[in-house]
Amino acid sequence: MKIAIASDHGGFGLKELLKKHLEERQMEAVDCGTDSEASCDYPDFAEKACRLVQQGAADCAVLICGTGIGMSITANKMTGIRAALCGEPFSAHFTRAHNDANVLCMGARVTGPGLAEMILDTFLDTPFEGGRHQRRIDKIADLERREHHV
Ligand code: RB5
């Protein structure tokens, strides 16, 4: 599995830790920045990582900022991206099973490192259930098309 990972300065430390965690799990982490704790703008890094998902160059993305909110707002502006901000494994499980989320967002100032690893593992290990949930995903895609034609 190839996973794009990105953060702003607020999420930098957690990004580095989760990169190691992915490598320990024999998964390929594609680091889309940032590369230090110097102040930067989360939309720049959300865009880079989500582009890889859109292009099929990554299976999914993990985005981390202080709260996870800026990253999730940005990611959900991008066509075909279904980003979920998760603070516990229950949401991570169901956003994969029911929403077929392809981007996981977390807040490094909200969620501690151990819990973040557990949330990430749950997200990666849960398949989409399809069925009635596919119909709802199709409606989201249809809404996206209609919005872009306004
Ligand atoms: C940066 O200080 C902070 O605003 C950012 O990391 C994030 O929490 C925004 O949603």
Image (cartoon, helix red, strand yellow):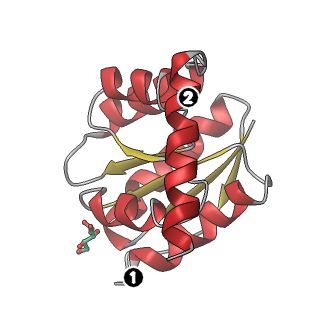
Give the residue at x 34% y 23%: 89
Mark 2 sits on what residue? 135
Q: Is residue 29 visible?
A: yes
Image position of 80 with respect to 21: above or below: below
Dot 1 amino acid type: Asp
Circle on res. 124: none
* Label 2 SS: helix
Residue to which mark 1 is pinned = 41
Ligand 1 quadrant in view: bottom left
From the image, state whether disc 2 or disc 1 is nearer to you.
2
Q: Say what secondary structure mark 1 lies in.
A: loop
Q: Which of the two labelled residues, at mark 2 and mark 1, occupies the earlier sequence position? A: 1
| Disc 1 residue crowd, few under 14, some 14–19, many 20+, Cα 10 Å | some
Q: Can you say whether 45 is above or below 130 in the image?
A: below
The answer to whether one can see residue 34 in this image is no
Residue at the far left: name it. Answer: 110
- Image location of residue 77, percent across then percent down: 46, 66
Q: Residues within 10 Å of mark 2 (few under 14, many from 20)?
A: few
Whole-Å distance between the Cαs marked 2 and 1? 35 Å
Residue at left offset 40%, top offset 71%: 8
